[in-house]
């Protein structure tokens, strides 16, 4: 939230692509609120790059996530989509 407070008056932030990675499937209300806030700030939400990874209650580190196909594949696809959006 503090980062958003700093960006709210920024001239550089509007229209910037933003991808959201939610690690808690139960946080749908928080995710929706964040999207609303970012849209109000004129961010460009890249929907195809915004995903939920079910990490709640795990202690998985980066290496574990990469080694788990069910987590690594959607994350890789989201990053690829985000790169495409940035380049567009």
Image (cartoon, rainbow, N blue to C red):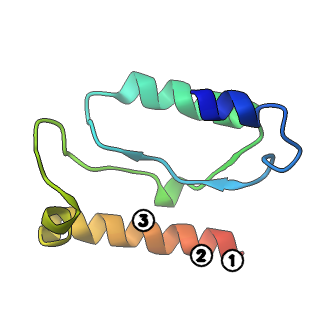
Give the side of residue 55 with respect to residue 59, left or right.
right
Asked if the residues shown at circle 2 and circle 3 are in contact, with their CB atoms under 8 angstroms apart, the answer is no
When the figure is inspected, residue 63 is found, relative to residue 24, above or below; the finding is below
| Residue at image mark 3 | 78
When the figure is inspected, residue 18 is found, relative to residue 72, above or below; the finding is above
Q: In which quarter of the image is residue 73?
A: bottom left
Q: In which quarter of the image is residue 65?
A: bottom left
Give the side of residue 22 with respect to residue 73, left or right.
right
Point 65% across, 32% down: residue: 4
Secondary structure under badge 1?
Answer: helix
State which tag comes first along the sequence, 3 or 1. 3
| Residue at image mark 1 | 87
Mark pair 2, 3: CA separation: 10 Å
Asked if the residues shown at circle 1 and circle 2 are in contact, with their CB atoms under 8 angstroms apart, the answer is yes
When the figure is inspected, residue 84 is found, relative to residue 9, above or below; the finding is below
Mark pair 1, 2: CA separation: 5 Å
Measured from the top left, where is residue 77 in percent x and y?
38, 71
Point 20% across, 62% down: residue: 71
Give the side of residue 44 with respect to residue 55, left or right.
right
Label 1: few (<14), some or many (≥20) within 10 Å?
few
| Residue at image mark 2 | 84
């Amino acid at each position: 939230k503090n980062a958003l407070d700093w960006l709210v008056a920024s001239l550089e932030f509007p229209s910037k692509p933003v991808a959201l990675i939610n690690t808690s499937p139960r946080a749908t209300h928080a995710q929706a609120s964040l999207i609303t806030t970012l849209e109000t700030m004129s961010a460009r939400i890249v929907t195809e790059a915004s995903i939920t990874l079910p990490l709640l209650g795990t202690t998985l580190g980066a290496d574990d996530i990469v080694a788990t196909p069910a987590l690594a594949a959607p994350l890789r696809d989201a990053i690829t989509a985000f790169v495409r959006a940035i380049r567009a």
